[in-house]
Amino acid sequence: MIMKLTKDLKVLLLIYLILLLVPIFVHTDLYLMNILIMCLIWSVVAASWDLIMGFSGIFTFGQIAFFVIGAYSSAILTQTFDLSPWLGMPFGGVVAGLTGLLVGLPCLRLKGAYVALVTFAVHMILAPLLKSDLGRALGTGGSQGILTIKPMHFWGYSFSSMEPLPWFYTALFISLLCLLAVYRIIHSNWGLAFTAIRDAEPFAKSLGINGFKYKLVVFGITSFLTGIIGGFYAHYVGVLSTRILGLNLFLILMVMLVIGGLGRFPGAVIGAYLATFLSEWLRPMGNYRMLIFGGLVVLLVVYMPQGIAEILFPQDKPGPLERIRRRVFPKERRASLSNDS
C-alpha cells in the first residue's frame, strides 16, 4: 500500500535524502562517519521508544534492555550456529520481541509509574544475568562479554571498520525500513487505537477497543524493531559488554525523546541526531557531560515541553513571528496589554 506523503513523512524522507549524499563529502573522516552510523542506530531506538511511550502512553524504561537482548542474541546465534549476520539480526529482533511480550504480560496489568518501575527493574537485572553462570552457558561471555563478533558480509565482501561506507549505507537501509514501519503503524488503525487508549482508555474500551491486546502488540513491535537494530549494532561494533546498560546511555536516550518531543514523529529521530552530536561535542567535559545533559532535560521540559517538534510541527500552525511573540508575551500578559490599550 502506497503511503500518503504527509508532512512528517516528507521530513523523514528529506533527512534520509540528505544522509544519502553526506558521505560524498565526509567518507574519509572515520570519526564523523562513525557518529552518523550511531545516529542511525539510536534514531530507531528513540522512535521505537516514542511509539510505546509517546503514542501509546505506556511509560516503560526497558527499551535499552531489548536493544541489548537483540544485540547479544544476534551475536550468539551467528557464532554458535555460524549464521549470516543478515539472519542473525532478524532472529535477534524475534528474541527481543518475544522477551518484550513476556515482560508486557505482567506489566500491562499495572498502571502508570508501576509499569516504569517493573521495566526499569528488567533493565537493572539484565547485566547481572548476562554475567551469571547461566549467561556464560548461553554464550554471553560473562563479565568479559563477547570480544569477537562476526562482521557483516555481502556477496563475499566482508565489511571492515576501516571502510565505513558499507556500514553506513547498511545502517541507512535498515533504519529507514524500521522508521517507515513506525510511521505506518502510527498512521494505521493500530496507531489510532494506541492514541485512543492513551488519551481516553475508558472511552476507547466503550468502543470495543481491547486495551490489553493493543498494549501487548505495541510492546512486541517496539521490542522487535529495537532488537533488530541492536543486532546491527553488535556486528558493527564487533564487541559487546554490559557497559551499554549503564545509566549514561539511558539518560542520553531520554534526552533524545525530550528534544524530539514525545508523540511527535519524527521528532525522536531529529532528537537522536541532535543528542548524539551534542554528546560527542561534550565528551571532553568528562563527568560534567551528564550534568549538562540533566540540566538540558530540565530546561527543555520547562520551556519546550513538546520538543523541537513544537517548532517543526506546530499544531495550531502559527507563523514564526507569532510563535516568538507568544514566547515573549504569554497569553495572560497579552490579554492584560490589550485591555490596557
Image (tube, grey):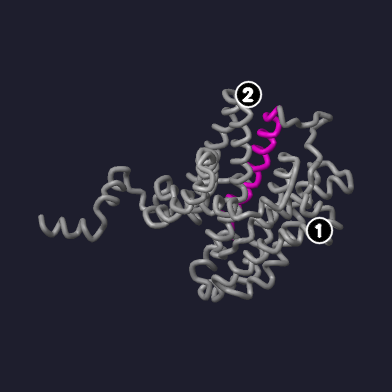
Nearer the observer, 48 or 318: 48
Nearer the observer, 264 or 104: 104
Q: Are marks 1 and 2 in contact (CB under 8 Å)?
A: no
Image point (59%, 46%), residue name:
43
The answer to whether 132 appears left or right of 6 in the picture is: right
Image point (59%, 31%), residue name:
32
The amino acid at mark 2 is: Thr
Question: Residue 147 location in percent, x, y?
Answer: 79, 43
Image point (15%, 56%), residue name:
338
Image point (70%, 48%), residue name:
230
Q: Is residue 101 found inside the magenta-colored segment of the image?
A: no
The amino acid at mark 1 is: Gly
Question: Residue 233 location in percent, x, y?
Answer: 70, 44
Residue 265 visible in the picture: no
Q: Looking at the rendering, which quadrant does residue 138 occupy?
A: bottom right
Q: Judge depth for marks 1 and 2 and give the one in front.
A: 1
Label whose residue precedes the other's in the sequence (1 or 2): 2
Instruction: Give the labeled residue for mark 1.
Output: 135
Per the image, label 1 sits on a secondary structure element best described as helix
Q: Which residues are magenta?
A: 163-189
Question: Residue 118 location in percent, x, y?
Answer: 63, 69
Instruction: Give the labeled residue for mark 2.
Output: 28
Q: Main secondary structure of the magenta part?
A: helix
Residue situated furthest left in the rendering: 341
